[in-house]
Amino acid sequence: MGGYGALYNGLVHISKFSKVAALSPASDPYIKEGNLSEMASFGREEFHSIFGTYEEYLNSSAYLAGGYASADKEELPQIFLGCGDRDIAVGSQVTALETAFCNAGIEPNTRNSLRIPDDLGTNDAIVK
């Protein structure tokens, strides 16, 4: 399961998970929907059969930012949200989700919404 699936299942099955980790999740599929013509094996028809129209998507549990914002904050699992600072594939989605979490009162230090710095693996960070 990828990061989107982890976040989705953590929301939909809120009583089953105490923690959720999502590394570079494609957390808003509609951001990429405009590029579907570039994908030969997956087109708009298939996409809409999964997520519905944009309006349907925004009112469904598939829309993670809205789902987490409307959920009972006391029941939510702890969330680790990680993404490299230069992730061109999903960086904007992770930033938008992180902002939505903060706007919804899901505190970064209690719901551990973090950005992973690109220099994490430098020699200075190695413990000998």
Image (cartoon, rainbow, N blue to C red):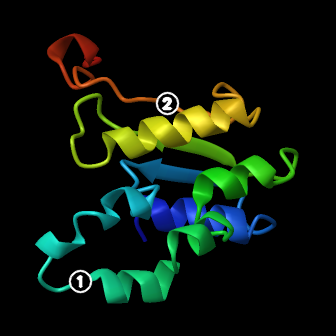
Which circle's residue, 1 or 2, is located before the other in the chain? 1
The residue at 57%/59% (across/down) is 7
Q: What element carries label 2?
A: loop
Give me the disc on residue 105.
Answer: none
Q: Is residue 25 left or right of residue 124?
A: right
Tell how many labels.
2
Which of these two is toward me, 81 or 29? 29
| Occupied quadrant, residue 33 | bottom left
Dot 1 crowding, Cα within 10 Å, few <14, some 14–19, many 20+: few
Task: Tell me if residue 114 comes above or below residue 82 in the rendering.
Answer: above
Left or right: where 43 falls relative to 65: left
**SS state under label 1:** loop
**Which residue is at a point 36% across and 39% down the rendered structure image?**
92
Which residue corresponds to mark 2?
A: 114
Of the residues shown, which amino acid type is indicated by label 2?
Answer: Leu
- Say which amino acid is labelled 1: Phe
User: In the picture shown, does residue 40 fall above or below 29?
Assistant: below
At x 21% / y 25%, what residue is drawn? 121
Q: Quadrant of the C terminus?
A: top left
